[in-house]
Amino acid sequence: MLQKRHSEGHRVGIGGWLRAAVLGANDGVVSTASLVIGVAAADAPTSAIVTAGVAGLVGGALSMAVGEYVSVSSQRDVEEADLEQERGELRDQPEQELNELTWLLTHKGMSAETAKTAAREMTDHDALGAHALEELGIRPGELARPLQAAVVSALAFAVGAALPLTAIAFSSVATRMGITAAATLAALALLGAWSARLGNAPIGRAVLRVVLGGMIAMGLTALIGYAFGVAAG
Ligand SMILES: [Zn+2]
């Protein structure tokens, strides 16, 4: 079977891990900053803000872990099923598979002669590996890893969440919202620039997007917290 799909969500390789970590940290920063600023806007004492922030950190990290585990597990199931199918095809119809590999190589720019030779040599060397890579875009030794993905995302979220939590815990009541917002926006700008660099995307636009998103999130929760504080007080 010929599948012309590119492998998605390559979670393996250092680039994939880094991107997952940056996204996790980004989530941790935004959600925790919004949470603690919302509670602070309701005029809550620092102890209540820190309690809410710690709960948000732990809950968010666990939810990242579970979500990532589930999504990467299903990706892994698909990869394993694809490999199993490929293994069966190589066993049952080796000639057709050789032609298929040859065809794929010509589409990569090889002449028919070269592709034929290359396909034969690749098949002798590691038929399954060659088909997995050329057809499915996966390397049999580097399948998606659910557990590692879960741990990386949860840790990254926790690290990101720790920043606004620390900022608000150690600021005075008068300055706590401003300092937390400033620290959050600075962290978001850095993360945005880093993730743009990882993806070779324009940095300015990425930074602007993530900073604006953070401002909106914190602004909205501050408004809601303020409204609740007024209603309760
Ligand atoms: Zn094949």
Image: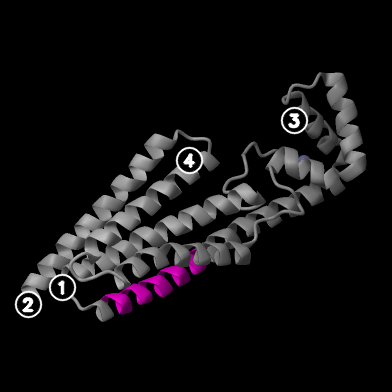
Q: Nearer the viewer, residue 198 or 167?
A: 167
* Label whose residue precedes the other's in the sequence (2 or 4): 4
Region rendered in magenta: 49-67
Q: Is residue 143 placed above or below 227 in the rendered structure? A: above
The image quadrant that residue 53 belongs to is bottom left
Q: Is residue 210 placed above or below 181 in the rendered structure? A: above
Q: Are marks 4 and 3 in contact (CB under 8 Å)?
A: no
Measured in 3D between alpha carbons, the distance from the residue under mark 1 to the one under mark 4, in whole angstroms, is: 37 Å
Measured in 3D between alpha carbons, the distance from the residue under mark 2 to the one under mark 1, in whole angstroms, is: 9 Å
| Circle 4: residue type | Ala
Q: Mark 4, mark 3: which one is toward the viewer?
A: 4
| Circle 1: residue type | Asp
| Circle 3: residue type | Leu
* Secondary-structure class at tag 1: loop
* Label whose residue precedes the other's in the sequence (2 or 3): 3
Q: Nearer the viewer, residue 13 or 117?
A: 13
Q: Is residue 211 left or right of residue 89?
A: left
Q: Residue at x 64, y 55 (%)?
A: 78
Q: Are marks 2 and 1 in contact (CB under 8 Å)?
A: yes
* Label whose residue precedes the other's in the sequence (1 or 3): 1
Measured in 3D between alpha carbons, the distance from the residue under mark 4 to the one under mark 3, in whole angstroms, is: 32 Å
Instruction: Read off the residue under disc 1.
Output: 43
Q: Nearer the viewer, residue 197 or 119?
A: 197
The rendered magenta stretch, by its main secondary structure, is classed as: helix
Please rate how many residues cluster around mark 2, counting C-alpha atoms within 10 Å: few if below 14, some from 14 to 19, many from 20: few
Measured in 3D between alpha carbons, the distance from the residue under mark 1 to the one under mark 3, in whole angstroms, is: 64 Å
Q: Mark 2, mark 1: which one is toward the viewer?
A: 1
Please say whether residue 136 is visible from this viewpoint. Answer: yes
